[in-house]
Amino acid sequence: MRTVVVAGHGMVGHRLVEALTGRDVQRHWRIVVLAEEIRPAYDRVALSSYVDSWDAEALALPAIQDDRVELRLGDPCVRIDRRKRTVHTVSGYRVAYDALVLATGSAPFVPPVPGHDLPGCYVYRTPEDLDAIRAAAQRAMRTTALGRRSGVVVGGGLLGLEAAYALRQLGLSPHVVEIAPHLMPMQVDEGGGALLRRFIEGLGVRVYCGQATTAIEPDRGRMLVRLSDGTELDTDVVVFSAGVRPRDTLARDAGLPLGERGGVLVDVCCRTCDGDIWAIGECAAIEGRCYGLVAPGYAMAEVVADRLLGGNATFPGADTSTKLKLLGVDVASFGDAHGRAQGALEVVHNDPVAGRYAKLVVSDDARTLLGGVLVGDATAYGTLRALVGAELPADPGALISPSGGELDASALPAGAQVCTCHAVTVETIGAAVQEGARTVPALKECTKAGTGCGSCVPMLKKLLAAQGVEQSKALCEHFSHSRAELFEIVAATRITTFSELVAKHGTGRGCDICKPAVASILASLSALLSPGSHILDGEQAALQDTNDHFLANLQRNGTYSVIPRIPGGEITPEKLIVLGEVARDFGLYTKITGGQRIDLFGARVEQLPAIWRRLVDAGFESGHAYGKALRTVKSCVGTDWCRYGVQDSVGLAISLELRYRGLRAPHKVKAAVSGCARECAEARGKDFGVIATETGWNLYVGGNGGFRPRHAELLISDLDTETLVRTIDRFLMFYVRTADRLQRTASWLEELEGGLDHLRDVIVHDSLGICAELDAAMEAHVAGYSDEWRGVLEDPDKLARFTSFVNAPGVPDPSIEFVQERGQPTPAHRRDGQPVLIAGSKLAVGAR
Amino acid sequence: MTAPVRAHWTAVCRYDDLIPERGVAALVDGRAVAVFRTHEGALHALSNLDPFSRASVLSRGIVGDRGGRATVASPVYKQVFELATGVCLDDPSVSVSTYPVRVVNGVVEVCSS
Ligand code: SRM
Ligand SMILES: Cc1cc2nc3c(=O)[nH]c(=O)nc-3n(C[C@H](O)[C@H](O)[C@H](O)COP(=O)(O)OP(=O)(O)OC[C@H]3O[C@@H](n4cnc5c(N)ncnc54)[C@H](O)[C@@H]3O)c2cc1C
Ligand code: SF4
Ligand code: FES
């Protein structure tokens, strides 16, 4: 086996290891990776999301588990000995190579202004940089000086704006200083830059364009930043993001030639003049040019992997398109965005009122698309970018006018790149579809398209449709509609029975899939369509799953469990005693649940009313553990008791649980409130989670425990209680309206086109104009709530259904038997060797 | 000649008390039987015992149809049984017993011999 040493375990080095281990089936190569950083490669592109969670694990790239790979963390190489073909690391480790690949990335450029090295000045490249910035921000917040704490970002490019966003998240007022006349000069033109500036300023960021930073001076514990026009900015933190410089010292010291502007000089096969040494990623100057984006780096990694295995791939050239979304502002640029090609024409559509700027650069005959800039609305990005270099399917003006309509995916040429991150073309996608990849997840799996920045996912859907692949959304054989469509039908037609719905819009008599789904829709809308109704009224009773039918959870032996609501997990001793007494008197097994309440198991169907009579009399109500509805809002003790609490998490959790109790949803909904960032209530594992801050609440959405855990993402921060509640109202109602059957908020959000930003647009900025409707729906729900169990106890007809046998109501089901275990009853046939089932009788692995 | 077998009919409940598309459990000669009334008004009686979970619960399943055949889905692991034959449509090697059922003077009766 030969040895390839990879210097640097960044995104590109990692990609090389992945590509090489994946393709080297003959096991020609052993791989030694020498990494300077203390953690394995992570997603640097997503670095800014670190300020939401402060969880570096969340950035991790898929680990490489392969016996051919040796990864040495925190041990950078310091010297290459080309004669002996060895590299030396800082710890003194030495390794001989047959091939050496430099993937050392680049370092932030810090302009040599006086004061650039003061404490309080930082760069923005690693989680450690962000930790340091955060610590400085927190120190600044603790000082008692008057006025808002602020931070200055030097550089108004893509990274600078991300840094400004991070400072804002940390509670500082951000200022951005850019030497060029407009923001993001690399990507956008002046018109786009002007609109972008308006957006950014609207978000509370102060922008200074056409200004150089001339000096930074210490000033009474803070700093003073001087700009070339004489402006002075008081600040607590300075972040430099004024470009990057390739890390080429190793190569230079080894006598390898560098590019004119730095970078390890390599040819189109990524090889240096020493045939055994290669360079890829940001440190490489490929034919003299460095690229500061990850996609070209990935392409270089693929080239080297191929070459090491005897192939003859060459660097295909790079697409420097970018799409950025900061706090809901879309910015995209692609191809020849600045119109540098000879004779290039520009077609501009600028609508400052609507907040939309679009420019297309086309060839002199206006027939070929060369590039473009989009600000404010980048929905056309995926299609336009793929069209670069191709003949335009329509008049360029029409393509970017707001009424220009959707571009037809089938118009794309075969060679057009759909996914830039992974260089996947229309042709490759087409072939994958032919070979049986019929869904977006399947395409991701076999082509990798869509697994990078994700911006091409809508395009993948269009391509599937263009290939004639129906993405069936039919609920079941009885309805060709999706759940969301049925919801809209019911809301619009005000149909209140399943029979009418299936007669008018479906076929047959329904099944165990569509009936509960329709029951849930009718229940979600009942506050508006049939106020005062009960889920077991009339025909609805026959639609409910057994759990809802008996308002309890069916257990494996045919008995039921009883979970009364304990809002926020807070309970008086008296109520605890009642639970104990009821459990004792009815012989029920008792357990504390994972949802901060108490579950009583083993109740026979005919016992449920008597049990609930006792519970309702003691002030309990249904906990909806049986329903696709709000389950629990967990809480931590918060300010009441905890010495770290900064807000009343228990009080809020209780009020949220009471507000949303009984709300029927596509799937169950769980929530939690934590009293401080220590997060003892595990709010980020919930459908919505609230975490207290010094000044309000942060709202996280789309979390999930269970089968496929996912952390909730920050939707908005520092809300007052009223705004928080209104936002959650809308979140829930929007989910109830649009999600699929049995789709938790996590997968709903993942599939929502435009993702979290779109959600924020809809429920915070009311981009669809539906917020008033959502608010009204929630108001109706809250006003119309009544306890389902009380409703049963008050209605003799409903009570009559809780019998063991219609013709022998006094006889308990003889098939139910219990044995004692650890002093409590458990089902008798529990240990007879049945396999443990998780979801259905078969757990479809990977089917979600 | 063996002794003649005489059909034994057990009264279950009034026909009008049955909710369409929702079952009830009845005790018929010591056995648990699930009785269903379909949307069209037809009656079916099946063993209440779900062969997959071995819990006595089929009467609590959701009634509907598959390809036009009236069915009930077990409430435990959701296998679907045809009401007329007791055959499990998800696994035809499994079936549950069916019983004759009739209405006499408005009362539903199940035969158990
Ligand atoms: C009782 C309890 C376990 C316990 O003893 O602690 C429990 C029990 C059941 N869980 Fe759970 N889950 C319980 C907390 C949880 C939690 C923890 C939590 O809520 O903080 C989770 C992970 C968090 C999450 O949901 O994101 C959890 C994830 C699940 C899942 C997987 C959901 C998913 O999205 O992957 C299922 C299956 C499903 O719903 O399809 C499930 C389904 C079930 C069912 C309903 C299975 C079934 O259909 O019979 C269990 C019956 C409950 C009953 O009373 O008969 N249970 N279950 C907990 C009741 C909490 C409560 O007070 O209501
Ligand atoms: C905040 C931020 C946002 C970004 N957003 C985007 C974006 O939206 N789109 C995009 O395309 N790009 C973006 N980028 C750029 C992208 O992250 C880089 O292009 C990409 O990470 C380059 O990968 P690389 O492996 O070449 O370098 P790096 O990821 O920097 O990795 C190089 C690694 O080598 C290590 N190293 C250096 N010297 C040595 C040595 N002597 N021995 C051992 N190890 C060494 C370094 O510590 C580092 O871990 C962003 C960058 C940042 C910081
Ligand atoms: S989350 Fe904070 S306030 Fe709540 S219990 Fe934990 S440490 Fe205390
Ligand atoms: S373009 Fe980024 S994942 Fe496809």
Image (cartoon, coloured by chain):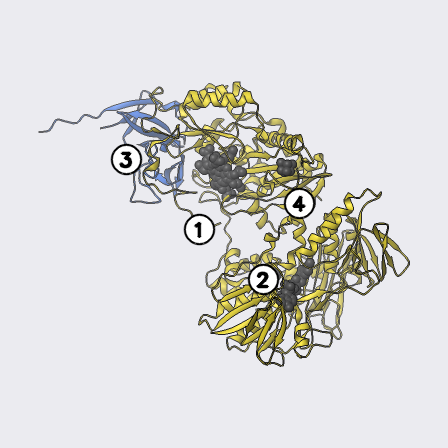
Answer with mark 4 or mark 1, whichever residue precedes in sequence. 4
- Residues marked 2 and 1 touching at CB (< 8 Å): no
The type of residue carrying mark 1 is Val
What residue would you read off at disc 4? A715
What residue would you read off at disc 3? B97
**How far apart are the alpha carbons under marks 2 and 3?**
66 Å
- Residues marked 1 and 3 touching at CB (< 8 Å): no
The type of residue carrying mark 3 is Ser
For label 1, the SS is loop
Residues indicated by labels 2 and 1 sit on the same polypeptide chain: yes
For label 2, the SS is loop
**In the picture, residue A156 is in which quadrant?**
bottom right
Image spot of residue A1 (x, y percent):
47, 74
Tell me if residue A214 can be seen. Answer: yes
- Within 10 Å of disc 1 (Cα), the crowding (few <14, some 14-19, many 20+) is few
Q: Nearer the viewer, mark 2 or mark 1?
A: 2
Chain A on-screen colour: yellow
What residue would you read off at disc 2? A73
Tell me if residue A544 can be seen. Answer: no
**How far apart are the alpha carbons under marks 4 and 3?**
55 Å
Q: Residue furthest left?
A: B1
Answer with mark 2 or mark 1, whichever residue precedes in sequence. 2
**How far apart are the alpha carbons under marks 4 and 2?**
34 Å
Chain B on-screen colour: blue
Disc number placed over residue A845 in the picture, else none: 1
Using the image as rendered, state which of residue A586 and residue B67 is in the foreground.
A586
